[in-house]
Amino acid sequence: MPEPILIAQNGKTQCFLLPDKANRHGLITGATGTGKTITLQTLAEGFSRLGVPVFMADVKGDLTGISQAGSSTTKLAKVLKERALETPEYTAFPTTLWDVFGKQGHPVRATVSDLGPLLLARMLNLNETQAGVLQLVFKIADDDGLLLLDMKDLRAMCQYVGDNASEFTTEYGNVSAASIGAIQRGLMQIEQQGGDQFFGEPMLNIADFMQTDGSGRGVVNVLAADQLMNSPRLYSTFLLWLLSELFETLPEVGDLDKPKLVFFFDEAHLLFADAPKVLIERIELVVRLVRSKGVGVYFVTQNPLDIPDSVLAQLGNRVQHALRAFTPRDQKAVKSAADTMRPKAGLDVAAAITELGVGEALVSFLDEKGRPTETERVYVLPPASQIGPINAEHRQALLAESIVAGVYEKTMDRESAFEKLKGHAAARAEKSDKASASSSSAAPAAGSDAKNSEPQDSGFLSSIGSGLGNLLGGGGGRRTSAGEQLFKSAASSIGREVGRQIIRGVLGGIFGGKR
């Protein structure tokens, strides 16, 4: 059995997180500046020592310091002395840097098909009708064997479905042009925010998150999220996709002596803000079942009210930092946090939450039997690694020495929906051009036939008219006057018309036609 992880203490009171209960998930809450980041870093170090890989999003840009050994400062030494805490053994931890935009870490990508219509609808902020049309687009792509890999594939597929909506109505249902337009506008916004870099290949291999170094310590995967936070929906959807990918990829293992991976979900309130019911149900399902895959999930947020009750009930390990009761909602949050923690005789949990100092917390972990321990008011231990961000030189060194260096940097663009639809459009255009050329070349031949047949008909009819004209005009070789010429022309026309009527009568009689 691995050694318990010491997280916090106050005098002789110590709070240990049991490794075999770490996959029962957890919650870290507290107002800004109360010490949540330090708690997260201390927890990550403890898991790494046990050989457990860790994933965490670096929202403020200061978690990369875990890759470098810490050092003592005058301020830190003073705090340690006041709280009677031992000076940590400063050391660095194996770290891999990731970045959706590929600037501050290795690129992280997923295909459009792998993300799926549910999460994509959440990212694009679609309503129920628009989300239904998006699902229809995915269904048509699947039925036609069209791969949706990157953003241009999805845009081309939406345009194809919109342009040919009448062809799909009977089999798939009504396709609204307004909904197609809303999806296209949402995709354009994601592209402007740089989110199109997230879609494509090579796609992230979850196994690359679950690595250990030569000494058996778990690798800490740090996602650069400071720029990603400018697109909150992209951030929350991306982390939820990662969590779902872990759930769908990893095999069932039951309860282990220690987790296979610990996943920290920072700024968790973004995940649940305005989330539709179907998405909340999906999150609840993943959180409840991913435990049996050996994954522990820890939500980090300012207010416990940010987490739905159905999810909150799954979080057994709690670290509660200070909350400020300035507003009625804050007061409700304090009461809610106090009510969800196991009481201890002589400790007013609700009052203590508003009195906690920086780095101080109320802690309740699960015991050997899976029960919450009594809430203790303790000080979180300082991390052994550097507190604060690393410099550009250290970052480049980490990227160059990484076990995945060069794996995800080069993008792939194999044949998919965009290329196939473009090829179909080109083939249709070529076929149309050939048809036009064929019809235009056939037109002169038909015209020449008409011209060739016209003189024959005109010659016969004109001869009747000319006969009448000569008869009426007197014939002879003398030169005709203008009046005579006009008269002969009229007579010739009359002759042609009479001739046509004679022919119609004869032919009608032959073929049984009616006058």
Image (spheres, rainbow, N blue to C red):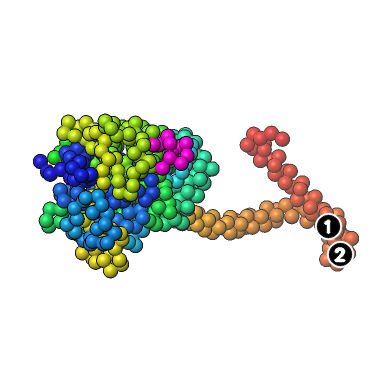
Position of 422 relative to 120 (above/below): below
Picture coordinates of residue 456 (x, y %)?
66, 55
Picture coordinates of residue 458 (x, y %)?
70, 54
Residue placed at 72% from the left, 52% from the top? Answer: 461
Asked whether the residues under the numbered discs 2 and 1 touch, taking CB atoms below 8 Å apart as contact, a structural biologist would say: yes
Position of 414 relative to 119 (above/below): below
Residue placed at 42% from the left, 57% from the top? Answer: 194
Question: What are the residue bounds of the magenta stretch?
Answer: 324-334
The residue labelled by disc 2 is 480
Q: Nearer the viewer, residue 225 or 140?
A: 225
- Circle 2: element type: loop
The residue labelled by disc 1 is 488
Q: Nearer the viewer, residue 26 or 445?
A: 26
The magenta stretch spans residue 330: yes
Residue 358 visible to an observer of this rendering? yes
Amino acid type, label 1: Lys
